[in-house]
Image (cartoon, rainbow, N blue to C red):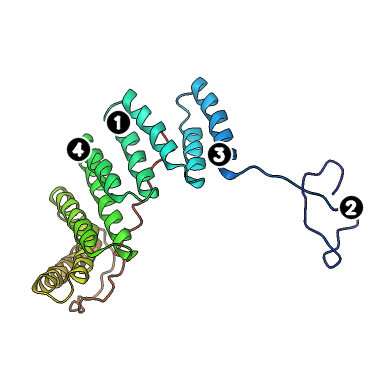
Amino acid sequence: MKPGDRRFDECDAKNVCASSFECRSAELCQLENTKVADMSGTHFGEWLKAHPEDAQTRGIMTQVWLDSSQYKVAIAYWEKLLAAKPNDPDIMGSLAGINLKAGDWRKSIEWYTKVAEAVSDPGAKVGAYQFIGNVAWAKLNSKQLTTAESVELADRGIGALQKGAELQPKNPKLVGLQASIYNFRALAHGVSWAAGLDRAAAQDLQRRSRVLSEEAKKAQGLSTTPTTPAPAAPAAPAAPTGASAGGTPKTGG
């Protein structure tokens, strides 16, 4: 301990204090993380009442809830915001991200789908559909789902990416991500004709993704790589370019 200093480093016969500190036996108490989060949320809430447009503080407050696993509190807060601003894509995107953190991938996909339906800009629609693909890839790659869940999630991911590809047919990321999810679905099907069809579809999509990537490089004046035959379907699909755990959902208003 040191006068005016709030640091309390452990010390004993082996771990001697610095000469400017005093080693003293003392009992310290601390609040549970949830209580600290509640206190922080209360103060952030008061600030936001006076500064409702402060997206940064709203994002920090939401992150405090997520870090303390208070997902229901975060969801209730953002649903209240949505009630005041129905169909706001930013708010729905935040709800999608929060539900994904809470482990509810179905609800997360529902919110991302609503975002895609609410926005008019084609690029924003594609972004929402790709988020769904990212969610599907990440959860399938975790290998924590049942066979039925894996097939269901793969179907949703592929369907969303196909909608995105209709808007941007030359986007190699959308095509490559579909290929990986087809491979995951093939693994879920096991040894069956459906698995064989999925692997064949994945190989076709992988070839198309490479072709589109080369075309994009040529259009930008970049060097290209020689085209090589598609490899056999991997046992565990690798992440295509642009795939992540649902992207980085916004938590700011």
Q: Secondary structure at mark 4?
A: helix
Q: Earlier in the sequence, mark 1 or mark 4?
A: 1
User: Which percent across, then down, holds residue 68?
Assistant: 51, 45
Question: From where the camera sits, is residue 204 visible?
Answer: yes
Residue of label 1: 88
In depth, the one of 222 and 171 nearer the eye is: 171
In depth, the one of 146 and 105 nearer the eye is: 146
Q: Earlier in the sequence, mark 4 or mark 2?
A: 2
- Quadrant in which residue 147 is drawn: bottom left
Q: Residue at x 54, y 24 (%)?
A: 46
- Residues under labels 3 and 1: Cα distance? 27 Å
User: Which percent across, then down, holds residue 153?
Assistant: 23, 56
Identity, as a three-letter code, of the amino acid under mark 2: Glu
In depth, the one of 13 and 220 nearer the eye is: 13
Residue of label 2: 22
Q: Secondary structure at mark 3?
A: helix
Contact (Cβ within 8 Å) of mark 4 with mark 3:
no
Placement of 152 over or under 202, stated as above or below: above
Residue of label 3: 37
Residue of label 4: 117
Q: Earlier in the sequence, mark 3 or mark 2?
A: 2
Q: Earlier in the sequence, mark 2 or mark 1?
A: 2
